[in-house]
Image (cartoon, rainbow, N blue to C red):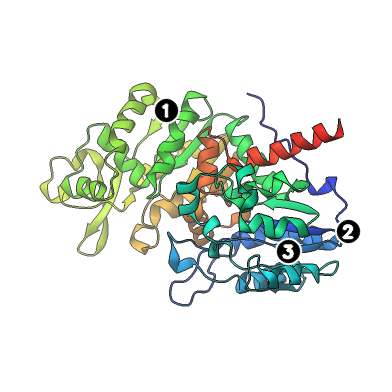
Amino acid sequence: MENKRISIKTLEDFDVKGRTVLFRPDINSPIDVKTKKIVNTNRLEKAAPTLQALLDGGAKVAIIAHQGDTLDYQNLIPLREHAQILSKFTGYDIMYIDDVCGPSAIEKIKDLKEGEAVILGNLRYLSEEITAFEKEVKLKPNEMLTTWLVRSLAPVFDLYVNDAFAAAHRNAPSMVAFQELLPTAGGKQLVAEYTALSKVASIPTHPCVFVLGGGKISDAFGMMRNVLSNKTADKILTTGLTGLVMLLAKGIKLGPATENFLADRDLMVFVDEAKLLLSQWEDNFFCPEDLAYEHHGEREEIAVASIENNQTLQEKLFFDIGSKTIETYTAELKTAGSIFVNGPAGVYEDPRWEKGTKEIWNAIAKAPGYTVIGGGDTITAATKFTDLEKFSYVCTAGGAMVRFLSGKKLPLIEAMENAFERNLRYKN
């Protein structure tokens, strides 16, 4: 397959000196529930190079970004700390104003001097930017031009720069509408993440191994059929709840405790899809050979084949993969040409169940192939157990990454490429 190339303008295509730039990164970060402080700065660190490049070039920059949502209200906080962290990463004093696009925000933008930047208020303060609005109203980009955000901000800017690949699956005004009105460029992170995922999706070095686990198994099932049918993935190593569902699909009885756990979370619906996948690509799947469970408060491991006829084990929940599975998976990772990872192997937050994730993550970090990890829990676990520098690429995206590898169109990429095409037409 040919590598996918994104047709957009980049920062190098523009002289930003003296220009007022609207910068849209994704700096939505994990928040401590009690302190309301940021606990992982990975996305802020990834956004800093584009912001620094703009300021080094003499741009006047206003930053629009979101934090939290109505669906995760505990993370819906102002962006003041984000400004402080970006100041540290860029070496510039990033200001903050608790106004999204009202008169105070407009006045602050107009007062910016070259090399100055301000973060505007949390985008999720606006109904136009919350997930419910996107799902219920379903506007097209050209229909978003009358939203308060766009009609308020667009007139005061010379250039729009998007660096938010992690939110590329969102069809929100801040993501797809400004391209209709302003010259548009992709930021450094946007280009890097698209390129890295394209390398996995389109031109992987074979054998290409996907390691899929975690608790959000819709992500795994959203991409498995696509990466197998287009021959991107040669092998899929399943862990976490994805591994349990695949075992059930193979006819292995893990007991009512496991089935009830999955049913309570509406995850048993994936068993039928797993059966269809196995009927077509059984040889491409690796499922856990042994699992870990709690016995008298301690970790115990048991071969999968021994669970079915053991009444005691039928009433157990399984929190991690076992040593034999780790050994088998590690051997596969050592010979992989490309590796993609999404989702931890078990409940790694508990020391009793961290072994699978810790050892698999370290095996991936040591693997000679091209390695891409992505998704919030994946990166958090990798940060805990390994050095992120040992992976070829760390992708900040979660939902966008899954949609990309599932072969689905991303609203942001469409908007950026449409802006590029419009520019070509204007030139001709």
Q: Which residue is mark 2?
A: 17
Q: Which residue is mark 3?
A: 62
Vertical arrangement, residue 29 with respect to residue 161, above or below: below
Which amino acid type is marked by label 3?
Ala
Whole-number angstrom distance, CA of label 1 to CA of label 3: 48 Å
Are the residues flagged by discs 3 and 2 in contact, CB closer than 8 Å?
no
Which amino acid type is marked by label 1?
Asn
Q: Nearer the viewer, residue 82 or 254?
A: 82
Examine the image and state in which quarter residue 279 appears. top left
Q: Which residue is mark 1?
A: 284
Screen quadrant of the C terminus = top right
Residue 417 placed where, x, y %? Answer: 70, 37
Q: Residue at x 45, y 55 (%)?
A: 358
Whole-number angstrom distance, CA of label 3 to CA of label 2: 14 Å
Examine the image and state in which quarter residue 339 appears. top right
Residue 384 placed where, x, y %? Answer: 50, 61
Q: Residue at x 83, y 47 (%)?
A: 12
Q: Nearer the viewer, residue 203 or 400?
A: 400
Q: Residue at x 53, y 74 (%)?
A: 37
Pick whichever of labels 3 and 2 is earlier in the sequence: 2
Are the residues flagged by discs 1 and 3 in contact, CB closer than 8 Å?
no
Examine the image and state in which quarter residue 372 appears. top right
